[in-house]
Image: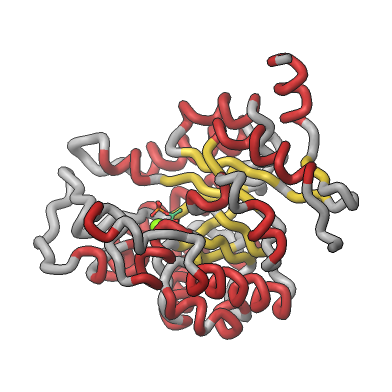
Amino acid sequence: ARKSALASAQQVAMTRDGIAIPVLANIGGPNDLENALTSGAEGVGLFRTEFLFQDSEALPTEDEQYQVYRDIAAALGDKPLTIRSLDVGGDKPLAAYPMPEEDNPFLGLRGVRLCLKHEALFNTQLRAILKAFQVQPNIQLMIPMVAQVEEVKKVKALLAHQAQQLGMDASKLPVGIMIEVPAAVLNADALAQEVDFFSIGTNDLTQYVMAADRGNTAVAELVNYFEPSVLKAIELTCAAGERAGIPVSMCGEMAGDPNATQMLLGIGLRKFSASASLLPGLKAQIRQLSLQA
Ligand code: PEP
Ligand code: MG
C-alpha cells in the first residue's frame, strides 16, 4: 500500500474532469529536497532562504549562497526552483546582523522592506541568485512582503544593476512576488503588470487581513484562513492573475490543507506549494474533485 501511495504521488494530480493541477514543495534548505522529490513535488514553489542567514554567526558569502542555490536547482533537474529572497525582520533577528528592536515588528522592517534598506546584504543575495541562474535556468526569484509597485521596481533596478556588473541580462530571470499583505491584494492588477507570477502566502495574509498576530494564541480564533475576508482576498488575487495572464500559486499553510482544496479550486487557484509530507494527501484530494459543477 505504501509503495502504491508513493507511486501515485509521483503522478501528476488531475482533477476528475482532467485538469492537471501542479503541486510543488516548500523547502527550508537542501536537506528537505530528497523528501520533496520522493513525495512527488513538481518543483519547489517556495525555498525559504532564511536558514542560510539564521543558523550561522557570520552572514553567508555570495559564493556560499551561489553554491547552495546552484546545487538545489541542479538536483531538481528541469523542475523549477523558486528562491524567496531573505524574509527576516524585527521578530526574527539575525545573530550575524543585529538590527534595532521595533515596537511592532510585524508592521516594521520585514522582508523586502528590510532588504531595500540594507542594500549590501540584498545585493549579495541577488548576485548569488543571478550567478546560479546563469548555470541553472530553472531558477526563479520570489520577493516577500511586497506592498507597493514601487518596491518591485526598486528590486528590479537592483537586479538589473547587479546583472550588468556580471555581464548578463537580468530580464531573463523570472521575478514573482508573494501576495501576503492586503495592499498587494487590493493593487494586484498593477502588480501583475510588473511580475511573472504571484504566490499567495496565507500565513501572513490571514494575519494582516484579520489584524491578528499569527503567533498569539489569544487571537487564534481570528487567525483562520477560512474567514470570508481571507477567501475573498485569495479570490481577488486569482482573478487579477488570470486577467494579466500570470500564474498564481499558493505557498502558505492553507495550500497543504486537504480541507481547503475544494474551496481553493472553486475560487480560482490552480497551483499549490506545500511541505513535502502533505503532498501525497493533497494530490489524492485534487484527484477526487472536479472543476466543473
Ligand atoms: C506565508 O506567509 O504564508 C508564507 C508562506 O511565508 P512565511 O510563512 O515564511 O512567512
Ligand atoms: Mg510570509
Q: Nearer the viewer, residue 215 or 102?
A: 215
The number of callouts visible is 0
Q: Could you tell me which residue is drawn at 54 percent across and 45 percent down?
A: 132
Question: Is 204 located above or below residue 5 in the figure?
Answer: below
The single residue placed furthest to the front in the displayed view is 221
Q: Quadrant of residue 279?
A: top right
Which part of the image, by quadrant, shows the C terminus? bottom right
Q: Position of residue 39 (x, y in %)?
A: 64, 29
Colouring scheme, one of rainbow, by chain, secondary structure, one colour: secondary structure
Which part of the image, by quadrant, shows the N terminus? top right
The single residue placed furthest to the right in the displayed view is 17
Q: Could you tell me which residue is drawn at 23 percent across and 69 percent down?
A: 108
Q: Position of residue 285 (x, y in %)?
A: 71, 42
Q: Nearer the viewer, residue 85 or 236?
A: 236
Question: Is 171 located above or below residue 203 in the figure?
Answer: below
Residue 136 visible in the snapshot: no
Q: Is 86 on the left-hand or right-hand side of 104? A: right
Residue 216 visible in the snapshot: yes
Q: Could you tell me which residue is drawn at 67 percent across and 62 percent down?
A: 269
Q: Position of residue 81 (x, y in %)?
A: 59, 45
Q: Is 228 on the left-hand or right-hand side of 235? A: left
The quarter of the rendering in which ligand 1 is drawn is bottom left
Q: Position of residue 140 (x, y in %)?
A: 59, 54
Question: Is 47 located above or below residue 208 in the figure?
Answer: above
Q: Could you tell me which residue is drawn at 62 percent across and 34 percent down?
A: 74
Q: Nearer the viewer, residue 107 or 218?
A: 218
